[in-house]
Image (cartoon, helix red, strand yellow):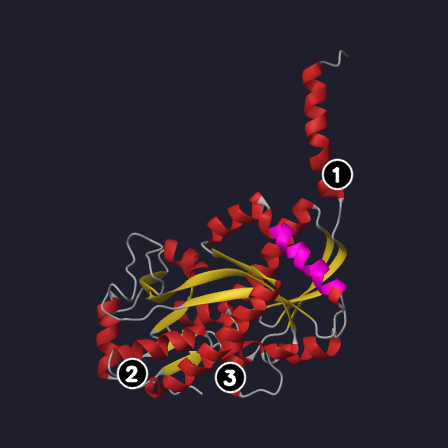
Amino acid sequence: MTITRRMLLAAAATAPALAARAEQRFASLVMFIPANPGGGWDGLGRAIEQVARQAGLVGNFQFENVGGAGGTVGLPRFVGQRRGRPDALMVAGSVMVGAVLTNRTPVGIANVTPIARLTEETGVVVVPASSEIRDIAGLADALKANPGAVSVAGGSAGGTDHITLGLMLRALGRSARQASYVAFPGGGPAQAAILGAQVKAGISGWSEFSEQIRAGRMRALATTGERRLDPNVPTLKESGIDVVTANWRGVFAAPGVRPEARQALIAFVTELHALPAWKALLDQRGWEDAFLAGADFEAFLQRDLRETEAVLKDIGLA
């Protein structure tokens, strides 16, 4: 076979990519998900695995799911069992911030090591397809008339979904304490309750309900962000309910990890974030790129803790 100049150039261009792919950041990584399978945190953990394995950044992933109470059941387990481990990451986010404050738990996000914020997701308010509620105005009327009669499914108490409902009620002239909020430990059980018409409505991240919306099994009434995610679904704000919320998610290391181990984990997620495959996955899932790492993430986290506590007190959830 004749080796042409073009073939040599192609091989030279490919070699660095192959070398980069072969260089692993971690031989093995534990992904701890303080929620049941099927929800947003589990989805982010699986997305990290998918992209990192394809890129050769990590050889093997081990998953552990411990759901309940907005992550406050699993969090003490991660803190106690993974302390000092340089090969472990926990997925968590704004839901845990709210749940820790609402439940007044002794172990909180302050007990783990911030690595990076990765995504932010707009929420969506839905009803089952069989519901007599046709649009967000119909749900608003029902909530104004009798909030206690309108059961709304969502994530754990005090999390983003619960806060969204509380803010909606306040905007409609009612008290958040009047809400009939049904908390679930993960997106899967909440979906089942909505699809089975066991509740009147539901609130969660767009990615968790988008498949059911596309299939016609759920009706999207409104999204919670500043702009529309779907041209046919209005935002709460443009519908006359002055509420804007979003759900951020990120990763944390165990307490007591050495500085060099923390830097290795930050380098891993920074490299992951830069991959074209990661950006493509964000677009596919409808997640906003909200990357912050290291000290910038720590500063954001402290601010978010203060602001979430103020909101929860304001709407009577803390």
* Mark 2 Cα-neighbour bin, 10 Å: few <14, some 14–19, many ≥20: many
Relative image position of residue 172 (x, y in whole percent): 25, 78
Numbered badge on residue 3: none
Q: Amino acid at mark 2?
A: Pro
**Between marks 2 and 3 in the image, the one whose residue lies nearer the viewer:** 3
As measured in the structure, the alpha-carbon distance from the residue carrying label 1 to the one carrying label 2 is 59 Å
Pick the quarter of the image with the N terminus.
Answer: top right
247 on left or right of 237: right
Q: Which residue is mark 1?
A: 19
Q: Amino acid at mark 1?
A: Ala
81 on left or right of 198: right
Part of the protein shown in magenta: 260-272
- Classify 248 as above or below 157: above
As measured in the structure, the alpha-carbon distance from the residue carrying label 2 to the one carrying label 3 is 24 Å
Residue 191: quarter of image: bottom left
As measured in the structure, the alpha-carbon distance from the residue carrying label 3 to the one carrying label 1 is 46 Å
Numbered label tally: 3
Q: Is residue 297 magenta?
A: no
Numbered badge on residue 147: 2
Q: Which residue is mark 3?
A: 101
Residue 5: quarter of image: top right
Who comes first in sequence, dot 3 or dot 1? 1
- Chief secondary structure of the magenta portion: helix
267 on left or right of 38: right
Q: Is residue 269 magenta?
A: yes
Relative image position of residue 111 (x, y in whole percent): 65, 79
Secondary structure beneath dot 1 equals: helix
Relative image position of residue 240 (x, y in whole percent): 22, 68
Pick the quarter of the image with the C terminus.
Answer: bottom left
Q: Residue at x 74, y 55 (%)?
A: 60
